[in-house]
Amino acid sequence: MRSLRLLGALIAMALLAVPVFARSAAPVMAAAPLAQAGECPTDYPTETLEIMAPAAPGGGWDTTAREIQQVLQNEVIDQNVEVFNVAGAGGTVGLAQLVSDNAGDEQTMMMMGLVMVGAIATNQSPVTLEQVTPIARLTTEYEVIVVPANSEYQTLDDLMEDFKANPGAVTWGGGSAGGTDHILVGLMAQAVGVDPTAINYVPFSGGGEALAAILGGQVSAGVSGYGEFQDQIEAGELRALAISAGQDVAAGATPGAGAASPTTGSATPVAALPPVPTLQEQGVDVELANWRGLVAPPEISDEVRQCMIAMIDQMHQTQAWQDVLARYGWQDFFLAGDEFGEYLSEERDRVIPILQELGLAE
Amino acid sequence: MGPLGDLASGFGVALTPENLLWALIGVFLGTAVGVLPGIGPALTVALLLPVTYDLEPISAFIMFAGIYYGGMYGGSTTSILLNTPGESASIVTAIEGNLMAKRGRGAAALATAAIGSFVAGTLGTLALTLVAPVMVKLALRFGAAEYFALIVLAFTTITALLGGSLVRGLISLLVGLTIGLVGVDTLTGQSRFTFGVPQLLDGIDVVTVAVGLFAVGETLWVASRLRHGAEETIPVRGSVWMTREEWKRSWKPWLRGTALGFPIGSLPAGGAEIPTFLSYSIERRLSNHPEEFGKGAIEGVAGPEAANNASAAGVLVPLLTLGLPTSATAAILLVAFQRYGLNPGSQLFQRDPELVWGLIASLYIGNVMLLVLNLPLAGLWVRLLAIPRPMLYAGILVFAGLGTYSQKGSTVDLVILYVLGALGFLMRRFDIPVAPAVIAVILGPVAEEHFRRALQLSQGNYMTFVTRPISGSILLLAALGLIVPIVLRAVQTRRTPPASSA
């Protein structure tokens, strides 16, 4: 399967004129030695590194994986990096493959994120994130709550007032049932004392359909990652009422970067947080980060785990990675190793109960 | 200056030798991936994105536009010749197109598809140039109720495909609707008919269903019959190119297909499939040769092919004016825009006029290139059919398997393909038409989704479908489409003798 994909990509690349290929393949920078404070005693990786994107090409996980691929092979390691897709069921098909087929495989990592935590619960996946080896959390995007420009709701308070009075009459448009957007509305309902089962959440497949429904005034309010709506917000077609960042993050000038990581050395702020008040600032005590990170298969040696963490840490510190974050408007959300593992279980404990309340998980 | 002046400057950008080269690479790649089932334009652009980062944005987009249009051209080739649709928008083409190929008119079918695609692509791009801002305002008025009404209208198409026996046609329809139910229900997140198989949670891909029922089913059927009767290869009958008569029968469907494809394609949830169904049923009704439908009528290829290419142009309307991605390829193009630090949306036309108009100009150029590339190829492709049948069908089987596997690289999909192939064989054995099943797989799930979403938005009020003006009008149209032919027939039979009544 991978070779087939690769074949397709190779044919495509061969057909591309040589100059492009030559330019992008030219070494941008000599690979720096990996050994860092004795964390990774050996040379790693010793062969082609593979990153699984457990989703179809083009989505968030796939895009992140392909950007990691570029930065790693251009700036961090001598080996090639390949990205392959295992799409299906919110990433749980890929997760199952990583745990069964790739156990002990020291040259493979998998992209994942908050959506997978939810999908494991809603799809009743027999394989869970407790079985994988956490490597690092890398990015986050905050959620934004918007209304069309001509909406009667001027502020979050206006919207929440109607929501509290008659939850069913306020329709929320967002992504798939049980996804990040749905979880946020559920958490907001809990925070303001509305029964989560009473919310009228309308899932749309694909960002475009939800956006069209919001712009066309088909729903009362929309929920999605800030990036999905950014252009329409800036153009004044949508009014942003709140973002889901935490107060501490919103207060800092370089959100995420300083707060999240003890090892980060980046001086340049990445994408600044959008100029929208947070939910918490407006009295709705909810914080939700749509984060993404990397995990490795189970049963790998501790040494290799350290090497993977060191490699990703080093990638995170490159200017090229900071440029990637800025280009996509992602926030830096770096957290490595055991701390990331703890974060995973915290997220699980927070997300699963709300999915159960929404009737989406058992 | 107006759009025409802007377009002229766009041609100035696109007509540099380097950009022409990118356009050529794009249309070539696009045609190639369109021909291969499973590898669509979306996947190709996604795979190429990291490689093209060093290109000028305009060059990259010119190439992507070529891939996008090229994929729509290429998709029809395998549909017509091998009954193996490369993507869902070519499924209707396979119905009449493959029958034409079996009658020896494969080259004409390919030619009418290519020219129809050219006409529709050019007119669609022209419409994109002139009416995009107006179109998009209209498109936003479409909500769930309107989409449901539109799908009901498309469903009336099936009545034309049910075949001789109503019962058999309905069985096929039910088979399709059941297959369409498999997977996670979009609105509640509950899984249906997945039997604990995680790969089934995302549903069964429409292309897999079409390839399984059409191509694999037919291969098994042919294989079971091979020892009965003499082998015959399919000869090319008459001229390789379109005859005068075929031209005459094609040009109106091209225009009507365009008129359906562009506006529906520009609707945020319109898609490329619905206009192909509508085009098919309209052509069948308007044709002077209705008896040829089901035996390979050229109108049934010309109309839907024009419709799917026009909808490809339509998809760019919300993408360029609102930053709304409404198809898989558009979503990837949006990612590409963001990669280059461009935010498509209402500001794009003002902020980067050079890029937008250069892109639009390159669509015109790409269309001409595609026609030049595809017309001579039609004569070449059609020779595939001269291959003796055992080898031809063995090849189709390999091709179908390869395409299905390469979509997700999942062996589960291959099992599904062959189960569906066996089902297709049984349906042929018992004379049940397969086309209604495939159409039901496409329309059933979206009909349900929009129906329930409309009710959710209206808080359970069923009147929403008739009280909303656009939705109500479309439903009325669908009702008339069903009732009028029946009434007319009744009136005609009562008036005996049937002396040329209008």
Image: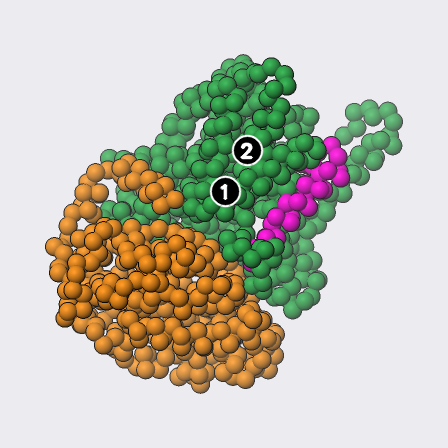
Earlier-in-chain disc, 2 versus 1? 2
State which region is magenta. B159-184
Disc 1 crowd rating (10 Å Cα; few below 14, some 14-19, many 20+) is many
Residue found 86% across the figure and 24% down from its top: B497
Q: What residue is pinned by disc 2?
A: B215
In the drawing, what numbered circle is on residue B414? 1
Instruction: State which quadrant residue B297 falls in.
Output: top right
Residue found 69% across the figure and 26% down from its top: B291
Q: Circle 2 sits in a helix, a strand or a loop, which is it? A: helix
Under mark 1, the amino acid is: Leu
Write down the chain letter for disc 1. B
Chain that appears orange: A
- A23 w.r.t. A215: above or below: above
- Looking at the picture, the colour scheme in use is by chain
- B438 w.r.t. A291: above or below: above
Image coordinates of residue B35 in percent, x first then y, are: 43, 34
Write down the chain letter for disc 2. B
What color was chain B assigned in the picture?
green
In the drawing, what numbered circle is on residue B204? none
Under mark 2, the amino acid is: Ala
